Image (tube, helix red, strand yellow):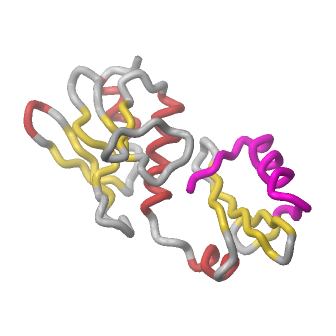
Amino acid sequence: MLNFNEKLSIIESFPQLERKDVSLGRVNFHFADSVTEKKNVVYHLHPNGNGFVYAGELAGYQTDAKGMVNIRDFSAEELRAIIGEAIESLSPKTVEEAAVAGEAHEEKWINNDGHTLLLIEEEDMWNVYAGLNLDGTFNSYGEAAEYLEEEGFRLLS
């Protein structure tokens, strides 16, 4: 388990987050550019190492009623991944994402380094995009999802 200072160091490595000291030595980190009313990405990081990260928009995490995940036992890699995913889920779409997806069904996939790819259904095919660049075309959703998982990506939203 990471201690308070190790978690703090990882969280502070995300320049998008703004530190807010709260009571009892706890610390919150806000994402001011959030497209939702939800601004707290890290909530009540406590000197004992306990704390929460907002994952209400993410798939694959067990959240409480407020969409928070307890990070007490997270490794450094897990903590970086969930914070990166949380920020991405609260960020506005890029111009490239809006241009590529339009009104089509889309999913955003992310890897542990924070890189994202879009999976979009277009004319009975499933296309994977890296920005405006087509990365791959698949006959079924299952094939596309399998490819993304093999490349180390997981569904973000």
In screen coordinates, is 70 left or right of 97?
A: left
* Residue at figure coordinates x 46%, y 36% from the top left: 62
Seen in the picture, residue 110 relative to 73 is either above or below; the reply is below
Quadrant hosting residue 21: top left
* Residue at figure coordinates x 65%, y 46% from the top left: 154
Q: x%, y% of residue 143?
A: 86, 51
Which residue lies most toward the left here? 23
Seen in the picture, residue 64 relative to 15 is either above or below; the reply is above
Viewer-proximal residue, 143 or 132?
A: 143
What's the magenta region? 135-157
Q: x%, y% of residue 96?
A: 64, 76
In screen coordinates, is 19 left or right of 113?
A: left
Q: Is residue 10 magenta?
A: no
Q: x%, y% of residue 103?
A: 64, 81
Quadrant hosting residue 49: top left
Which residue lies most toward the right here? 139
* Residue at figure coordinates x 22%, y 37% from the top left: 44
Viewer-proximal residue, 142 or 53?
A: 142
Q: Quadrant of the N terminus?
A: top left
Seen in the picture, residue 148 relative to 138 is either above or below; the reply is above
